Amino acid sequence: MLKFLPMLFVALGFYACANNNAQSNPKQDDLLRQNAHNNSDTSLSVAADTNINKNVVMEIDSSLTPEYLMGKFDPSKDNRFVKISPPYSSADMYGRKEMFESFKLMQAAAKKDKISLTIVSATRTYDMQKAIWEGKWNSKKPVDGKILPPLSQLSGKERALKILLWNSMPSTSRHHWGTDIDMNSVSPAYFATGKGLKEYEWLVAHAAEYGFCQTYSEFGESRQTGYQVEKWHWSYMPIAQECTKAYPVLVKNEDIKGFVGSETAVDIDIIKNYVLGINKACQNLPK
Ligand SMILES: [Zn+2]
């Protein structure tokens, strides 16, 4: 369905990051090792962690950089992105081209079933996410329906965890990648009944046909950690699964910084528990 940019095959000793790919199957490992061998000119070895006694070979899309994965770029100047405007979205915004092409097909198919789909949020940069995060941290906006108590009554980590019910730390949002979209509403109540419920049921039945998956699904076997269930947030997995795979290789908890409360990222283990706290079934979708 999609053509990918050339891949850089990376052979690395995988650190204990609880990556979904840690459960890779042996056949795939063999294939990846073989590919890495065949691409030895561009392969990169990373020192093995002592906790893991075998090298795991991963392929990393060479177009993915830490800056991109952490939202530190300008999508309006990046030719992988396209401007998205009404009636596709509620306002002007940017998204990855392939994601938007697929969304348009999905939107048209939904329309035939009398279901209306509108993107209400697509790409958010680090700076945009920083404004959201710091707004919540400073109690100017309600978190989970309430204004946070003063910092004196809530430790930094507790405060961060409350915000993390619904909002990402800057640098860690899937919205940085331009692959993820929120549709129609960001209210759990909206999708619980009536029109919103019908829209959600349509997405559950058909979104995968267009490469979209609900990353913040119900907690259970397929997802143990991360944000609350978000029925509006759908990820275009043909690109997003490459980003998910690359993220823990290229970004460490210590790199999550530059905003108020960022010192909690290491203690919370933000990458393991939030960046990788997604519905495992999404990562198994065909490209
Ligand atoms: Zn979202």
Image (cartoon, helix red, strand yellow):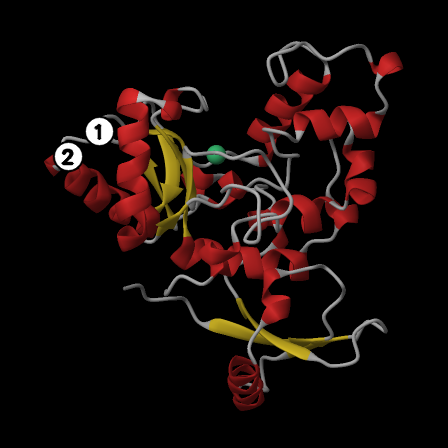
Q: Are marks 2 and 1 in contact (CB under 8 Å)?
A: yes
Q: Nearer the viewer, residue 43 or 31?
A: 31
Question: Residue 232, image x and y in percent?
Answer: 41, 33
Q: Residue at x 74, y 74 (%)?
A: 13
Left or right of residue 236: residue 102: left
Would you place residue 136 above or below residue 33 in this image?
A: above
Left or right of residue 204: residue 140: right
Circle 1 crowding by C-alpha within 10 Å: few under 14, some 14–19, many from 20: some
Query: Which quadrant is home to the N terminus?
Result: bottom left
Left or right of residue 136: residue 238: left
Task: Looking at the image, tell me whether mark 2 or mark 1 is earlier in sequence order.
Answer: 2
Give how far apart the Cα atoms at labels 2 and 1 are.
6 Å
Circle 2 crowding by C-alpha within 10 Å: few under 14, some 14–19, many from 20: few
Indicate the secondary structure of the residue bearing disc 2.
helix
Q: Residue at x 38, y 20 (%)?
A: 190
Circle number at residue 116: 1
Q: In this rendering, does residue 118 appear at all?
A: no
Q: Amino acid at mark 2?
A: Lys
Would you place residue 196 above or below residue 257 in this image?
A: above
Circle number at residue 111: 2
Q: Nearer the viewer, residue 119 or 285?
A: 285
In the image, is the residue at mark 1 within 8 Å of ligand 1 by its beta carbon?
Answer: no
Q: Amino acid at mark 1?
A: Ser
Query: Which quadrant is home to the C terminus?
Result: bottom left
For the image, the number of numbered tags is: 2
Question: Residue 36, image x and y in percent?
Answer: 57, 84
Would you place residue 47 above or below residue 139 in this image?
A: below
Would you place residue 278 above or below residue 148 in this image?
A: below
Circle number at residue 88: none
User: Which residue in the rendered view is the most extreme toward the right?
Assistant: 152
Q: Residue at x 26, y 31 (%)?
A: 117
